[in-house]
Amino acid sequence: MTYEGGDEKPTLVQLIARFRTSSDFVQYEADTDKVKYWVSYIRTLVDLKTFEQSILPIVKSDKWDKLEDLKKSIPVENIIITIDTDVIKEKLLAGYIVISLSEYGLPCALIKATINKARDVSLPEVEFSVVGPKEAFVESLESNINLIRKRITNEKLRVYELNVGDLSKTKVAVLYVDDVCDEQNVHTMIQRIRDIKFDQISDSSFITQMISDNHNSPFPQLLDTERPDRVSSILAEGKIGVMVDGSPHVLIGPTTLVEFFSAFDDYFYNWINASFFRLIRLFAVAFSILVTPIYVATLTYHYELIPNDLLNTLISSRREVPLPPILEALFLELTIELLREAGARLPTKVGQTIGIVGGIVIGTASVEAGLTSNILLIIVALSALASFTTPIYAMGNTIRMLRFPFLFFAEWLGLLGIVLCFCFLMTHLLRLTSLGRPFLEPIYPPRTIDMKDALIRLPFSLMSKRPQQLRTEKPKRFSAKNARKNKDIDE
């Protein structure tokens, strides 16, 4: 039998020899009146207080002379007695204490004494909302699963755990609701995670890149969220959640393009207000991508489309600008991106100062120096502001990047270039899938039922069915007919 990476399965002697090269590995010999024993553990993974107060006094006592007797005496769950060196290695690295009756003898008793250090549940930072729950995921997998279990108190919620990464052995949990979620989607997700061949998995973003349908697409094909309420709601729809130990973000799939522009706050407001805000976001995204390319295309090729009054204003604002519109636009766009990156990488208070002061100083100085026009400065500033309305950060980065291909096409062919670039974009989106499901659904293929919670959000009373693209085992969430009857009776 061979080990991962081609190594042979080690004996206990070889295993202990490997661990001894690490300074935090502890092994010592002790005895009682009845028996001599060896204790081994990794100091930095073990809760020493638990070990010294709950385990060590019983180990030192004369109440046992066999490992089976020791197992019955110690008030700790899941004590394992094994001769498998693979299990011993795994449990040592998980914070277990190994007790054996000889230095290199088998079997060994494995006693759990893991130290749990995790950040407390805090407020969401990326998807903050004024109304609704104020809890966010943390880096502890157990804590994150608990946050979902509190919201879905049903025995049909399934948690399937895997270890991913040849070196890191990172715990990954796949969550879904049995009898609701399509089995094919579950099998696809689990199989893709199992097929990952990488040594180190340190965050859920690694999983996203490795199991996405199209690795060369700038669009995220799995939704990334830090909100437990959003995950529990989407699991109830029939989707799948993926949690990674050490990551405060959960992946959700399969997903669609319109979901990236839907904030979970939309479900806390009246459906009219929620639909209005959602349409505002969609308009802002289109504005952010297209407004600067349209400015470049119009000034380069299509002066006749500009009204005379506005044309005079444009001419006066560009009178002292020596650069063509494309270079002027690129200068400001790149300046905005530099300010964003500087603000994101610096400490919070310094980053805010850099963003505000830097934007004002650079913008004013560039206009006074004649490098840019004041009209384009306003347009680029509004474009940058509009891009921040995207609720999902990963999609916001994609929107930022998309402006540049449109700018180059606008310089090349004017408005025709913008249309051509839009055609390329739509072709890519039409071919894109998430876990094999159409990414552009319900726009294409058109599905009327799913449009109830796409571009706009209709009242909950009209959303009695789960999304068609998920092919859930239970398409109905509730009976709309019975709900209307009950409402009429109450009235």
Image (cartoon, helix red, strand yellow):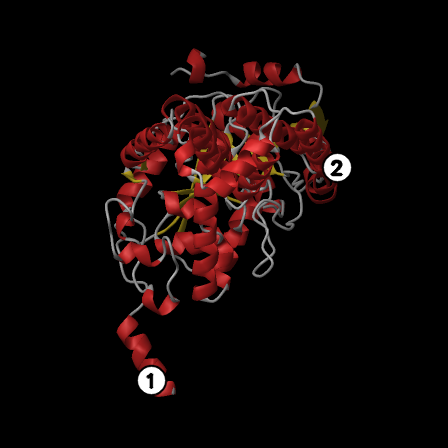
User: What's the distance in space between the residues labelled 2 and 1, CA to CA?
Assistant: 57 Å
- The relative height of residue 244 versus residue 92 in the rendered view (above or below) is below
- The relative height of residue 480 versus residue 414 in the rendered view (above or below) is below
Report the front residue among 250 and 340. Answer: 340
Residue topped by disc 2: 353
Residue plotted at (38% across, 47% down): 258
Residue plotted at (45% across, 36% down): 289
Left or right of 97, for residue 213: left
- Report the quarter where the N terminus lies: top left
Residue topped by disc 1: 488
| First reached walking from the N terminus: tag 2 or tag 1 | 2
Report the front residue among 282 and 296. Answer: 296
Amino acid type of disc 1? Asp
- The relative height of residue 241 versus residue 92 in the rendered view (above or below) is below
Report the front residue among 87 and 305. Answer: 305
The image position of residue 313, as x and y in percent, is 56, 38
